[in-house]
Image (cartoon, helix red, strand yellow):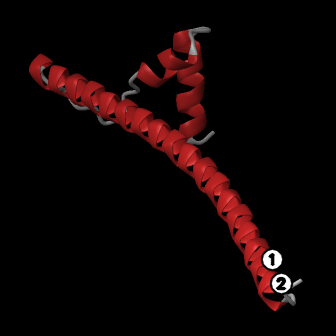
Amino acid sequence: MDNSRIESALIEKKLNGYSETSARNFILPSEITVTITLDEYRTLVQNDATRKHAIDKANEDRYSREQQIKSLSDENARLKGENYDLKNKIDELNEQLHTLKEAPDA
């Protein structure tokens, strides 16, 4: 039996049905661990919370920008359609004016 199987069997026996998070928190004698102070732990937690807050804020900003982009795209499409209609109307009026100028006086 290789070391990983022995370690897995040892964990399973010692935990005896605990959840997966308990399995991740269990320290085997062969593992390397690090001890930190409470102040270092608080700093880590604070940095994590600050980072999560920054990510949430960036996501909100992204959402509002996407909404603004969608609104401006809709307005752009509407204005392009309006511009097309006005150009067609100008062309029709120019054609009518040209026709009137060419028509003999009655």
Q: In percent of the image, x 83 and y 84: which residue is there?
A: 99
Image quadrant in which you'd find residue 52: top left
Q: Observer-nearest residue: 64 or 49?
A: 64
Label 1's element? helix
8 relative to 25 in the view: left or right: right
Question: Residue 40: where, in percent of width, then height?
Answer: 13, 26
Residue kind at label 2, given as amino acid type: Thr
30 relative to 70 in the view: left or right: left
Q: Observer-nearest residue: 67 or 86?
A: 86
Q: Is residue 44 above or below residue 95?
A: above
Evaluate if marks 2 and 1 touch, with contact meaning CB atoms under 8 Å apart.
yes
Question: Residue 49: where, in percent of width, then height?
Answer: 28, 25
Q: Is residue 98 above or below residue 10?
A: below
Question: Residue 57: where, in percent of width, then height?
Answer: 35, 32
Q: Residues within 10 Å of mark 2 (few under 14, many from 20)?
A: few
Label 2's element? helix
Q: Residues within 10 Å of mark 1 (few under 14, many from 20)?
A: few
Image quadrant in which you'd find residue 90: bottom right
Residue kind at label 1, given as amino acid type: Gln
Mark 2, residue position = 99
Q: Is residue 79 above or below residue 15?
A: below
Question: Residue 12: where, in percent of width, then height?
Answer: 59, 18
Image quadrant in which you'd find residue 98: bottom right
Q: In percent of the image, x 24 and y 23: which residue is there?
A: 45
Q: Observer-nearest residue: 14 or 35?
A: 35
Residue 96: numbered disc = 1
